[in-house]
Image: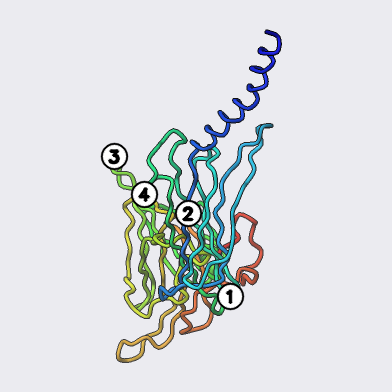
Amino acid sequence: MIMKKQSHLCYLPILALMLNSACAQNKPVWNATIKVIDEAGQPVANADAVMGWNVNAPDGTLTFGKMEGLTDTNGIFKTSHEANGSTDLGFQASKAGYYPTKEGQEIAPLNDSDPAKWNHNVTLMLKKIGKPIPMYAKQIDSITFPEFNKAIGYDFMAGDWVAPYGKGTTTDIFFSENHTNANSGYTFTISFPNPGDGIQGLTRDSKFGVSGLLSSHEAPTDGYQPEYVQTQMPNPNRIYYFRVRTVLDENGNVKSALYGKIYGDFMQFTYYINPTPNDRNVEFDVGHNLLGGLESFNQARLP
């Protein structure tokens, strides 16, 4: 009898191992296919592709786990990893000569048995690094209007209101905060001092991830409107292009102008202006801001 009891006890570690193995087999696995393309839609080979996730350590700290590798000749990198309870995945692609691109996706709960929710297909587009240039750039998180219901001039190169409200000397753009009544609130009106000046905007498309360069490499040649009225809540995914200090010839064609861009929405945005007349390049060299003396919270940190 004693020997028989010992025999049963010997099976307990083996049974525990089998149960643990079964539980592990039932644990979902992330499967990811990352495709990396260029701006022409062509595959980018030998790009660094990363799938990352958060890991909750036993001591309560949050760490970061990742699987990474190079894309093949078709721009594809495939990877997988056992789920650990993280609620989202992060994807990134990078390669020398390009701006990195990233994207995040939510993950299904651990008790979700739908296989489709554990398979992720991500396409990331890499934009080439062209010719980054020094520009006047400033991040504005909030702005205090000197007066309401009045167009106030702002000098992009001085980074301030035009005198007598600030140290600016040349009006690039007019901002007006228009208060109506307690029920309808207020609107922002953007206008310009010169014929040919103007602005145009779009909502950033993140279909192929978020590039390190949010804008295009160049501002458009035309399509600028002399006035823009914002009546909706600010959208941080907005991008604007503007043309200022415009001089027209006798036929109404643009003879000279300065071009720039805006990331964000009014009145929380970052502006960039190229100081070279008729140069539509808006690819900012982050290390060379021509607007000096800025506080850290006013620094433009994106190209």
Question: Marks 3 and 1: which is nearer the front?
Answer: 1
Q: Element at badge 1?
A: loop
Q: Hey, which residue is sitting farthest bottom in the picture?
A: 250
Quadrant that contains the C terminus: bottom right
Q: Indicate the secondary structure of the residue bearing disc 2.
A: strand
Closer mark to the observer between disc 1 and disc 4: 1
* Residue 233: assigned label: 4
Q: Earlier in the sequence, mark 3 or mark 1?
A: 1
Which of the pair 244/168 is nearer the observer?
244
Q: Earlier in the sequence, mark 1 or mark 4?
A: 1
* Element assignment for label 3: loop
Circle 1: residue type: Gly
Upstream in sequence: badge 3 or badge 4: 3
Report the front residue among 242 and 1.
1
Query: Do residues under tags 2 and 3 come within 8 Å of each other at their CB atoms?
Result: no
Residue 32 is labelled as 2
Residue type highlighted by circle 2: Ala
The label nearer to you, 2 versus 3, is: 2
Report if residue 82 is visible in the image: yes
Q: Residue 9, located in which quarter of the rendered image?
A: top right
- Relative horizontal placement of residue 199, taking residue 27 as reference (left or right): left
Q: CA distance from mark 1 to mark 4?
A: 37 Å
The residue wearing badge 3 is 183
Q: Marks 4 and 2, how far apart in space?
A: 35 Å
Q: Which amino acid does the dot numbered 3 rest on? A: Asn
Do we see residue 266 in this rendering? no
Residue 97: numbered disc: 1
